Image (spheres, rainbow, N blue to C red):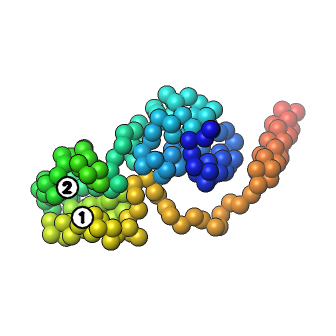
Amino acid sequence: MSHFRSDIRQRAEEAVALYPRPRSAMLPLLHLAQEQDGYLSDQGIAEVAELTGTTPADVRGTASFYDMFHLEPVGKYVVGVCTNIACLLAGGEEFLTHASKKLGCAVGSTSDDGLFTLEETECLADCDVAPVVQVNHRYVRTTTPESFDTMIDQLRDGKLDHDVPSHGTLIRVRRIGGLRASREEVAGQRTAAKAARDARAEGEAK
């Protein structure tokens, strides 16, 4: 039985079909697994391994390389505060200390209510609005303790659900453009491309 919900499983199979080798779909599938569970659960990792023809160890090893993937449960909201040079000069470390007190958890841990995980991040590439804060990889641009506190209270009350979905959700609006081809069509194009390559190689060998 699939660990993925039916809609996630369908999207996963569609992603695999886009690549010549199933293994190449691993990163998109990891994002889907995290979208469903909020982090990469053992069951989600096993399903990604099945779909990509790899092992759970392969999948876990790949996921551990990327900061966006979490191998343990995190809060509904992952709050990242940058302390790189521009943000450091703008009070990033002090801001991180304030965030820890407001959320009631240490950096790298989750609040007792399970809502917030606090992270110290590398550069978030929004240096003109320092110190930079992201929640679930969305810029929230709360540069003062007061605005940060207001934002956290709004998250607690569900007032920002439209702007900041639960952790793991990269997008909520599904693309209706771009590639829309059946598996048969994709397979046929791959076969034709391989035949063309083989013909060129044969011609060059003569």
Give the residue type at disc 1.
Ile
Mark 1 burial class by Cα count in 10 Å: few <14, some 14-19, many 20+ = many
Could you give the CA–CA distance between mark 2 and mark 1, rounded to whole angstroms? 8 Å
In percent of the image, x 16 and y 58: which residue is there? 102
Give the residue type at disc 2.
Leu
In percent of the image, x 56 and y 28: which residue is there? 55
Position of 25 relative to 202 (above/below): below
Q: Position of residue 58 (x, y in %)?
A: 51, 30
Within the image, what quadrant is residue 65 found in? top left
Q: How many marks?
A: 2
Within the image, what quadrant is residue 162 found in? bottom left
Q: Position of residue 204 (x, y in %)?
A: 82, 37
Mark 2 burial class by Cα count in 10 Å: few <14, some 14-19, many 20+ = many
Q: Secondary structure at mark 2?
A: helix
In percent of the image, x 21 and y 59: which residue is there? 86
Residue 103 - label: 2
Q: Quadrant of the C terminus?
A: top right
| Residue 43 left/right relative to 197 | left
| Residue 197 left/right relative to 4 | right
User: Relative to the observer, which residue lies in front, 13 or 132?
Assistant: 13
| Residue 144 visible | no
User: Relative to the observer, which residue lies in front, 146 or 64?
Assistant: 146
Q: Position of residue 139 (x, y in %)?
A: 33, 64
Verify CB contact (< 8 Å) between mark 2 and mark 1.
Answer: yes
User: Mark 2 or 1 closer to N-term?
Assistant: 2
In percent of the image, x 84 and y 42: which residue is there? 195
Residue 164 - label: none
User: Relative to the observer, which residue lies in front, 109 or 139?
Assistant: 109
Which residue is labeled 1 in the image? 152
| Residue 43 visible | yes
Q: Position of residue 179 (x, y in %)?
A: 68, 60
